[in-house]
């Protein structure tokens, strides 16, 4: 399938598959090693398209610096949206490898409590950037935060992002239910 970037209007070639999840696959971009594409298994529904369009229009250097925030959308020749492009997250270390004492001693043997506090402060600063622009993260959990080789927060992945200013119904599409308030997942 031929895909085009909605905003840029340029054709895009997906490279090697980097990962696979419930919604689709993540691919390298042959033209741009600093970004990746998330391609859905099915075209996005109208609600998701509205949210993604709004998120791409809200993209700016501050957000792209701290989050794998959508910067453009993938569309086919009929105009159906099949995914989005975002900054590449190169880090392979999940943040929980740092905050768990046992994992920290194995994954980061040089890390001490000062480093844990330093990374925690950077996570708080990243949330401050999001909140200052009117956005919230709908699913905060360790699976969406990565640490760079320099032992610093690299960026959040935003697969389950809620953007309060980006749509009339900002709810995230997926969540790790063990980290979601029961009231939020089962209406009364």
Image (spheres, rainbow, N blue to C red):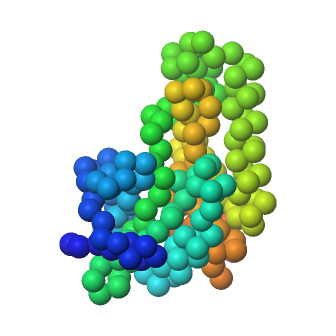
Q: Residue furthest left?
A: 1
Residue 40, by quadrant, is: bottom left
Picture coordinates of residue 105, whole percent (x, y): 57, 14
In this picture, is 116 found above or below 53?
above
72 or 164, nearer to the observer: 72
In this picture, is 152 found above or below 138?
above
The N terminus lies in quadrant: bottom left
Tell me what residue is drawn at x 42 percent, y 53 percent: 35
In this picture, is 151 found above or below 88?
above
In this picture, is 177 found above or below 58?
above
Tell me what residue is drawn at x 30 percent, y 71 percent: 11
Q: Inspect this view and state whether residue 69 appears.
A: yes
The C terminus lies in quadrant: bottom right
Tell me what residue is drawn at x 28 percent, y 54 percent: 30
Q: Residue furthest bottom?
A: 78
Left or right? Give the position of 20 relative to 163.
Answer: left
Tell me what residue is drawn at x 47 percent, y 36 percent: 91
Picture coordinates of residue 96, whole percent (x, y): 58, 33
Q: Inspect this view and state whether residue 26 appears.
A: no
Left or right? Give the position of 181 relative to 144.
Answer: right
| Numbered disc total | 0
Picture coordinates of residue 71, whole percent (x, y): 51, 64
Residue 104, by quadrant, is: top right
Picture coordinates of residue 174, whole percent (x, y): 51, 62
């Amino acid at each position: 399938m031929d895909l085009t970037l909605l905003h840029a209007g340029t054709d895009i070639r997906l490279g090697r598959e980097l990962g696979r999840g419930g919604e689709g696959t993540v691919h390298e971009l042959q033209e741009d090693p600093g970004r990746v594409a998330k391609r859905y298994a099915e075209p996005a529904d109208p609600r998701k398209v509205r949210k993604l369009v709004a998120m791409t229009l809200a993209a700016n250097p501050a957000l792209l610096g701290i989050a794998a925030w959508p910067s453009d959308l993938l569309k086919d020749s009929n105009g159906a949206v099949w995914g989005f492009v975002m900054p590449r997250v190169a880090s392979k270390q999940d943040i929980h490898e740092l905050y768990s004492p046992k994992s920290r001693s194995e994954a980061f043997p040089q890390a001490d409590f000062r480093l844990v506090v330093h990374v925690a402060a950077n996570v708080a600063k990243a949330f401050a950037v999001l909140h200052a622009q009117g956005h919230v993260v709908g699913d905060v959990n360790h699976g969406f935060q990565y640490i760079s080789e320099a032992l610093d927060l690299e960026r959040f992945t935003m697969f389950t992002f809620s953007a309060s200013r980006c749509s009339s119904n900002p709810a995230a599409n997926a969540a790790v239910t063990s980290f979601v308030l029961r009231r939020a997942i089962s209406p009364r």
